[in-house]
Image (cartoon, rainbow, N blue to C red):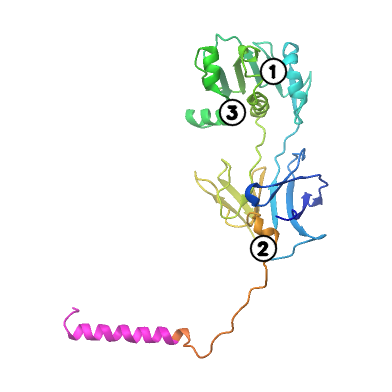
Amino acid sequence: GGAAPSVAFTLDDRPYPSAAEVRPLAEGRGWSWVLRDVPARGGRFVAELIAGDEPISHRLDRRAAVVLPDRPLIRVALSPALAPRLGSLLAADPGVVVASAECDVAIGLHDDVPTGVPTLRFVPDAQEDAFSIGSDVEGSDDSMLRDAFFSLGLEHIDAQALAEEFDRPIRLDVHRTPTRDIAVWESLLSEEFDFVGSKSFPVFIARALRFLTDAEPLLSFAVAGEPVDSDITAWSVSRPDRSTTLDAVGASFVPPRAGSYASGDRRLSVSLGTLEPFSAKGPDRAPSVAPADRSSFPLWSVLALLAFALLGVEWWAFHRGRMP
């Protein structure tokens, strides 16, 4: 119960003016703050609990930080034949701009797309698989398939319902190509099927454009001592006297302490702990410390008595022939 605590936001150490939407969590577990259209330009975004107008200056960490990805606008060349279907969808994506020249991605029918750029093509149903993905991701076939499946948001598609409507299996094929490419059945755009009108279709288009451009992913909130949700296992941490590289060698990276980490051009901001609901308020009262009872035995006296008792047991066992 009660009002939500105040939170201050900064972007690259400068105050970030925001009209955050405050939402209560279920079962009174706390609050969440929702911010929209935060620029993804590689900055460090920090949220800090405040008391009144001043930040809380306790030894406990009251801040949560994340390094935003660097995602420039994706320039998309859209075939005029697909503009009625996809034009409004692309216009609603704040990370996309439709461009007729110097595009990053092309979307078209069949082979009516520019060459030399990643493409999203809608092709005849004669293609064996509903989704055919050309990928340059390194790794095993299984890892490529898994990467494409989740990168494109295909887990949100009701493949069973589509298979019943098409009366054929909905399958995914992934193969290696020097330039990324996605080929999808053209019939999936038809009003006869429910794919375009489903909630999964905008997700698929948005994810497809970012997969094709190999957009830098957003690293989840990282906490010291907990695994980082990233396929990068080696991170370096800089100190005044030296720089140390930590490599999890095939496992999830677990940052040992809070601070800033780097892997090539990627940055990771690690916080001390999660902002649990209880951290928004101080303790009910100051902890009390009881004075030491000088009449009790000190610890060294107890240990000495135990040692003498052990020697006595060994002496008795030796003279009784119980020890060799």
Q: Is residue 141 magenta?
A: no
Residue named by callout 3: 156
Quarter of the rendering containing residue 282: bottom right
Q: What residue type is labelled 1?
A: Ile
Q: Please identify the dominant SS of the magenta region.
A: helix
Quadrant housing the C terminus: bottom left
**Label 1 environment density (alpha carbons within 10 Å; few <14, some 14–19, many ≥20):** many
The residue located at (60%, 29%) in the rendering is: 153
Q: Nearer the viewer, mark 2 or mark 3?
A: 3
**Label 2 environment density (alpha carbons within 10 Å; few <14, some 14–19, many ≥20):** few
- The answer to whether one can see residue 239 in this image is no
Quarter of the rendering containing residue 242: bottom right
Q: Where is residue 106 in the image (x, y as percent from the top left)?
A: 70, 19
**Label 3 environment density (alpha carbons within 10 Å; few <14, some 14–19, many ≥20):** some
Residue named by callout 1: 107
Q: Nearer the viewer, mark 1 or mark 2?
A: 2
Quarter of the rendering containing residue 279: bottom right
- The answer to whether one can see residue 228 in this image is yes
Q: Earlier in the sequence, mark 1 or mark 2?
A: 2
Q: Which residue lies furthest to the bottom in this view?
A: 295
Q: Which amino acid does label 3 sit on?
A: His
Q: Which of marks 2 and 3 is nearer the N terminus?
A: 2
The residue located at (75%, 31%) in the rendering is: 95
For residue 288, side relative to residue 54 (left or right) = left
Q: Which of 245 and 226 is in front in this view?
A: 226
Give the CA separation, mark 2 to mark 3: 39 Å
Residue named by callout 2: 60
For residue 89, side relative to residue 287 (left or right) = right
Q: Does the magenta stretch include residue 315?
A: yes
Give the magenta-colored segment's residue range.
301-324
Kind of element beneath mark 2: loop
Cβ atoms at labels 1 and 3 below 8 Å apart: no
